[in-house]
Amino acid sequence: MHFVNKKYYMLFLLLLVSFNYAQSLVYNYEFGNFKDACRFSYNYSGYFYVSDCGSNEIIKIDTLGNVSKIIGGYGWNESLFDYPIDISTNILNVYVTDYNNNRIQIFDKDLNYISEIRNSEKLDFKYPTSSQISNQGDIFVLDSDNKRILKLNRNGNLITTIGGFDAGSYQLNSPSKFCIDNNSNLYVISKNYLFIFDQFGNGLKKIKLNFHPRNINIINNIISLVNESQILLAFSINKNELFKEDKFFTLENVNDIKDAVLINNKLFVLRKNIIQVFDLVN
């Protein structure tokens, strides 16, 4: 996993075509060697944290493919996982959604264990599929069993629930993943719908999508939605015109896209075994 693979001879297989605008993505390089990656999160110090559901490991790796640390393996003790389905990070900490262990494990940026948030009588959630932290330090957990999002304070105490049965037209029927922007708004994918809530749980928008995303990510208020072979980039969040200036790409002959983020005009695409890097060009 300590390499950068410059397979330019594969360029013709790895071009992305834009359907909406003149911009396109051109293959640059790839790195990583994962068993079955399912999610990644970028830290502004220049590292990706990759959740490998196949090996039950978390990998800290830089954008050139140099691995800094690997933790995990199957289990239920601290720093072990049973299907780490999601991962998120801020400047200080890393949050791993440990699906089958019904908990969120919290680590520092060097992947040293700090604490965990676990299902309990006071905090009822099962089979979490996503967790995020806001700029205010609030922790949000997607409780797939009860089809809602829990908002917790930094000590893990419940503040409120979002998108539950009492949310009216903003009730989440099949929530799978979500992300948080710089204004602490939540973007939740539920089948082919995108729900947008403010940090207090008030519904702001409900958008029907033209495809069924499997994952959602956000960097610098640019949203990336992906399914197995397609990537949708949305640039216009701050203008309150989401998807008016979107870019839609398809990766030909590929059916294993897991996640994607746009950083400094480079699109990092997480696939099952690798991370591929593309340049966004006119």
Image (spheres, rainbow, N blue to C red):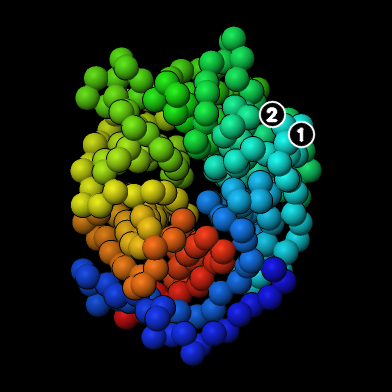
Q: Is residue 196 visible?
A: no
| In front of the other: 71 or 88 | 71
The residue indicated by pointer 1 is: 78
Q: From the top left corner, tell me how far across and down residue 166 is, in percent.
A: 31, 15
Q: Which image quarter is the N terminus in?
A: bottom right
Q: Is residue 255 above or below residue 29?
A: above
Picture quadrant of residue 114: top right
Picture quadrant of residue 260: bottom left
Q: From the top left corner, tell me how far across and down residue 160 is, in percent.
A: 46, 18
Identified at 46% across, 85% down, the residue is 10
| In front of the other: 225 or 34 | 34
Residue 21, label in figure? none
Picture quadrant of residue 68: bottom right
Mark 2 touching mark 1, by CB under 8 A?
yes
The residue indicated by pointer 2 is: 116
Identify the secondary structure beneath mark 2: strand
Q: Amino acid at mark 2?
A: Glu
